[in-house]
Image (cartoon, rainbow, N blue to C red):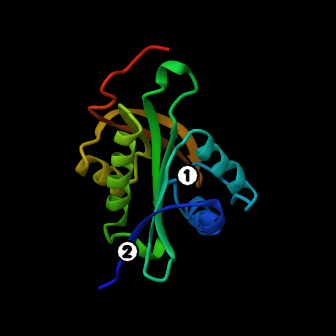
Amino acid sequence: MTQHAIVQCTHARHAQAILDIFNEAIATSTALYDYQPRPLASMETWFAAKDKGNFPVIGIEDEAGTLLAFGSFGTFRAWPAYKYSVEHSVYVHKDHRGQGLGLKVMQALIAAAREHGVHAMVGGIDAANAGSIALHERLGFKHVGTLPQVGFKFGRWLDLAFYQLLLDTPLNPVDG
């Protein structure tokens, strides 16, 4: 049986693997509403934003240290009153989908969100992505709205569905 390890991803160790997963998703799916592959230099900015916000980048590696899946969360919206809400994403390498890795990453992200005092996790999911929607529903996320035809990719309009999980954290939320 293959052994998997949950790891904290770093720029030095994981930037290329994360970029490869991103770029495959951009080229072949509506998991990302980008058109063009991202350059390696974009990973510096991406990781810097995660570091600045103290946001986790959680990965799953196989026994050889190959990154199979990863997820993270970040700022939901830029205004201060949203400080207890995050928007998350999870991606699985194309050769390792359907093996429960997305579930493991999401469980680790939910645990990290609780540790960070997050109250609301929000996922923006292409409404046709049945696999991601089923994963989120399995974890207790609720459908809270769909924005019809807000994206356009592969010659068609795309609907963006929002799924939310409310956590029992933080224990003592404060204004300001």
155 relative to 96 in the view: left or right: right
**Of callouts 1 and 2, the N-terminal one:** 2
In this view, the residue in front, 149 or 16, is 16
For label 2, the SS is: loop
- Residue 141 on image: x %, y %: 28, 41
Report the front residue among 47 and 28: 47
Report, in whole angstroms, how far the alpha carbon at label 1 lies from the one at label 2: 26 Å
Q: Is residue 110 above or below residue 8?
A: above
Amino acid type at image mark 1: Leu
Asked if the residue under mark 2 is in contact with the one under mark 1, i.e. CB atoms within 8 Å, the reply is no
Q: Secondary structure at mark 1?
A: loop
Q: Is residue 51 above or below residue 171?
A: below
In the rendered structure, find residue 32 and report the number of the disc placed on it.
1
Q: Is residue 84 above or below residue 54?
A: above
Residue 132 is situated, as x and y percent measured from the top left of the image, at 36, 54
Most extreme residue toward the bottom is 1
Task: Say which quarter of the image contains residue 11.
Answer: bottom right
Report the disc number at residue 45.
none
Question: Pointer 2: what residue?
Answer: 4
Residue drawn 59% across the image and 52% down it: 155
> At 57% across and 38% down in the image, what residue appears?
53
In this view, the mark in front (1 or 2): 2
Q: Residue at x 29, y 34 (%)?
A: 167
Total marks shown come to 2
Instruction: Residue type at mark 2: give it.
Output: His
Tell me the residue at 30%/54% (across/down). 135
Residue 4 x/y as whole percent = 37, 74
Is residue 155 rendered to the left or right of residue 123? right
Local crowd at mark 1 within 10 Å, few (<14), some, or many (≥20)? some
- In the rendered view, tell whether residue 156 sits above or below residue 29: above
- Whole-percent x, y for residue 95 in the image: 46, 76
